[in-house]
Amino acid sequence: MEYDFKNYKNLLESKNEKIKELKDAVNSEVSLKLDLLHKSNEVKLHPDRVKEEYELSKAPTEKQIQAYIDEKYSSLTNDYELAKQNTSLIRKDLELLDNRISFEKYVLQLELRKNE
């Protein structure tokens, strides 16, 4: 029996595509994280906006500021959390591909020993 390299080649191509997908997912995740961080810092640097919007009589507490950020940017926070989960799933897919590639290498090695 002769080893079919097509499966091994397909796995390597799949891994290459998955790495590209991971790169895009990481870029998206980092972009969302930085956008959220920038907007959060902007609010923290200007707590008077929170005071005015909620008509508070005194300066808002840290918890009030965080609650404002959480509510104001909930959609962005959700997108960021989804991007993190997406990146995590792609990493798991890559791990599975690596395991399948290792298995194919093992099968190839067995085939080569058998033919010696």
Image (cartoon, rainbow, N blue to C red):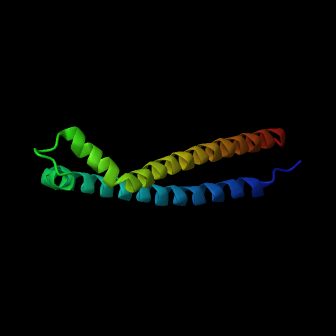
Q: Quadrant of residue 95?
A: top right
The answer to whether residue 19 is above or below residue 89 is below
Taking the spot 64% from the left edge, 59% from the top edge, the residue there is 13
Report whether 18 appears left or right of 3.
left
Given residues 13 and 85, the one toward you in this image is 85
Q: Quadrant of residue 116?
A: top right
Q: In the displayed image of the protein, which residue is found farthest to the left?
A: 58
Report whether 49 appears left or right of 105.
left
Q: In the displayed image of the protein, which residue is found farthest to the right?
A: 1
Report whether 45 appears left or right of 108.
left
Taking the spot 25% from the left edge, 52% from the top edge, the residue there is 40
| Whole-percent x, y for residue 72 in the image | 32, 54
| Whole-percent x, y for residue 4 in the image | 81, 54
Given residues 56 and 62, the one toward you in this image is 56
Given residues 38 and 20, the one toward you in this image is 38
Taking the spot 17% from the left edge, 51% from the top edge, the residue there is 55
| Whole-percent x, y for residue 64 in the image | 23, 42
Given residues 43 and 110, the one toward you in this image is 43
| Whole-percent x, y for residue 73 in the image | 34, 54
Image label count = 0
Taking the spot 36% from the left edge, 59% from the top edge, the residue there is 31
The answer to whether residue 106 is above or below residue 36 is above
